[in-house]
Amino acid sequence: MHDVQAARGASLSDAAPFARRPVVLLLGVAALVLVADLVTKHLAVDGLRSGHPVDVVDGLLTLRLVRNPGAAFGFAQGMTVVFTVVAVAVAAFILRIAGQLRSKAWAVALGLVLGGAMGNLADRVFREPAVFRGHVIDFLELPHWPVFNVADSCIVSGGVLMVLLSALGVAHDGATAAPEQS
């Protein structure tokens, strides 16, 4: 059997596992975020009561149980069905381009967004008041900031990382933009 050669003399059979690594990283980050989000929400629901905040770090971090029918940070209350559809679309898009990933940084960014979207989607699908209209559990509060959860913070962190990578000219396929000539 003859090896088909890939770029720079490596066989395609040698290149294939490397090509899959960013996808594995994306899925691993997403799974880690999802588990962390689900576990922390479970602990918040079991250990906190609505209307009874708990100061963790005086003046810096408070745990406050909030059942959020809107988007991240309490935005757009009552649009749960819309955000359910958006989360499914985001997840489908990320999974669709996952096979093209060659950048580990993009894999991390997209994994953060995917895991966060899945964490909040799980709440919207399975929590009260009804299927696909469930309220998202928020419980982390910083001074002068709306109450949020692990999923929200990962979605925002992943988005910031994507903006940074784009600004640096790093594409999801690992290509980098050539510096502009003046």
Image (spheres, grey):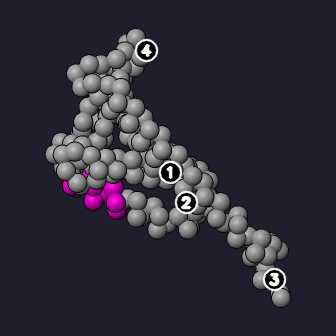
Among the two numbered marks 1 and 2 on one chain, the one whose residue lies closer to the N terminus: 1
Label 1, label 4: how far apart the Cα atoms are:
28 Å
Query: Looking at the picture, which amino acid does disc 4 mark?
Result: Val
Is residue 83 inside the magenta stretch?
A: yes
Query: Looking at the picture, which amino acid does disc 3 mark?
Result: Asp
Q: Nearer the viewer, mark 2 or mark 3?
A: 3
Among the two numbered marks 3 and 1 on one chain, the one whose residue lies closer to the N terminus: 3
Residue 167 numbered mark, or none: none
Q: Is residue 169 visible?
A: no
- Which residue in the protein does label 3 denote? 3
Q: Which residues are magenta?
A: 81-89
Label 3, label 1: how far apart the Cα atoms are:
34 Å
Q: Secondary structure at mark 1?
A: helix
Of 161 and 32, nearer the camera is 32
Q: Secondary structure at mark 4?
A: strand
- Which residue in the protein does label 2 denote? 172
Q: What is the number of callouts on the image?
A: 4
Would you call the spot at circle 3 few (<14 residues within 10 Å), some (14-19), or many (20 or more)? few
Q: Nearer the viewer, mark 3 or mark 1?
A: 1
Query: Looking at the picture, which amino acid does disc 1 mark?
Result: Ala
- Which residue in the protein does label 1 denote? 30
Among the two numbered marks 4 and 3 on one chain, the one whose residue lies closer to the N terminus: 3
Among the two numbered marks 1 and 4 on one chain, the one whose residue lies closer to the N terminus: 1
Would you call the spot at circle 2 few (<14 residues within 10 Å), some (14-19), or many (20 or more)? many
